[in-house]
Amino acid sequence: MTDEQVVAVYDVESWLPPARAAEVLANEQSTGTFVRVPGESEALRHRFGATVLDVTELPDAGHTPLPGATRPPGAGPRPHRARVRIAFPLRNFGPSMPNLLAAVAGNLFELRELAAVRLVDLELPAAFAGRYPGPAFGVTGTRRLMGAPDGALIGTIIKPGVGLQLDALRALVRELASAGIDFIKDDELTGNPPHAPLRDRVAVVTEELDRAADRTGRRTMYAFNITDDIGRLEANHDLVLAAGGTCVMVCVQTVGLAAVAHLRERAALPVHGHRAMSGALLRSPQIGLGPLVFQRLARLAGVDQLHVGGIASKFYEKDEDVVASVRAMRTPFLGGYEALPVLSSGQWPGLAHRTLELTGTTDLLVLAGGGIHAHPAGPAAGVAAMRSAWRAAAEGEPLADRAARDPSLALALERFGGVRA
């Protein structure tokens, strides 16, 4: 790879020989058409065409071919499968994420010659670092604003996710903040509803956070969901900033990477990146993007915290997929782009030891919704149980031993099903 190229890595299936399928992809996404056109000279193709770097055959994964995939007469019963690396000249699109995606993930998903195609990795040249500064806060800045220099960061989501009136929101935030929770966020389903407009929500929440900080000496970080049209993002951010808020949240896929980058240029607060709708692009092993690609682009756009799934979660990822995502988030690219992995979905105290064992780090923001709110003794006890479990994990104390002297943890284990292996 040179500073004049983007290298994209794909898992491809096709009844064409793998090398030919790679050429079809490279041509479609750069200089090629189904027939030569005037002006499409060899010199132009040499200068601006994508180049197949290598093709490595892979074993058949048993996938059902994508709809409309072409199987030539006389072809075998199963398509070939290969990992393909293709270099795209940066001069074709420049250091622009929207134009980058048009090049490396544009029409290729629609090609009949491909029975499956997934973009699994992306190597970017230094020009992107010059264009996109990335996270402004990351792990270090988030910890500083929370006043939490070490240990797993414990957070929750406002539940129920819809329909909660302002008085109930106030009471819930008061209890959670007084219990010393590190982080609270709006549910991604809560935007700017008539019963709890963003402006009123910000006023109620920040008032309660300030009061709790006066009592405890620490201020809980709250991520207000400011997801909206691009023209509203800056005003929504400024509303939170003016009230003394310390974090904003956007749904990365629904606003788009360009909108996140637009917000990052203007933001003075950390950006919490929610992954709502990501499954549409990431879930299938046959089409779309791999999680590594999404995470790199989201970090490049400027998110400081990003959801990566959860251990033993209710979502589709296997534990090893989540661990790989955590490791990828902690691996620098383009010289940095530090961001905080966020674990969510079905998290509760019984998962602390396994999560730490698998990920090998406490640089995590662990969000428990029901795992805190549904505690038999209430949300404050749910916070205490999560904190206790993670401290036990970090100190190497068996969870059962800690629960024997911690009633809140013992109740949590009883309520949610005991210690999970």
Image: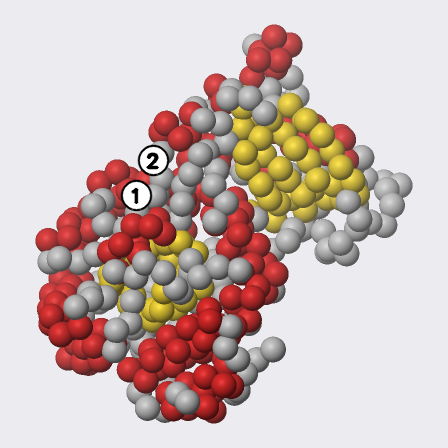
Can residue 169 be seen here? The reply is no
State the quadrant of the C terminus: bottom right
Give the image location of residue 377, x and y in percent: 32, 91
Residue at x 64% of width, y 17% of height: 36
Q: Is residue 313 shown above or below 42?
A: below
Give the image location of residue 133, x and y in percent: 34, 35
For disc 2, the marked residue is 133
Q: In this view of the protein, which residue sits in the foreground, 161 or 5?
A: 5
Q: Quadrant of residue 123?
A: top right
Asked if residue 106 lies left or right of residue 174, the reply is right
Q: Is residue 116 shown above or below 19?
A: below
Type of amino acid under label 1: Ala
Residue at x 20% of width, y 46% of height: 268
Give the image location of residue 337, x and y in percent: 41, 41
Q: Is residue 336 shown above or below 139?
A: above
For disc 1, the marked residue is 136
Evaluate if marks 1 and 2 touch, with contact meaning CB atoms under 8 Å apart: yes
Instruction: Indicate which disc residue 72 carries.
Output: none
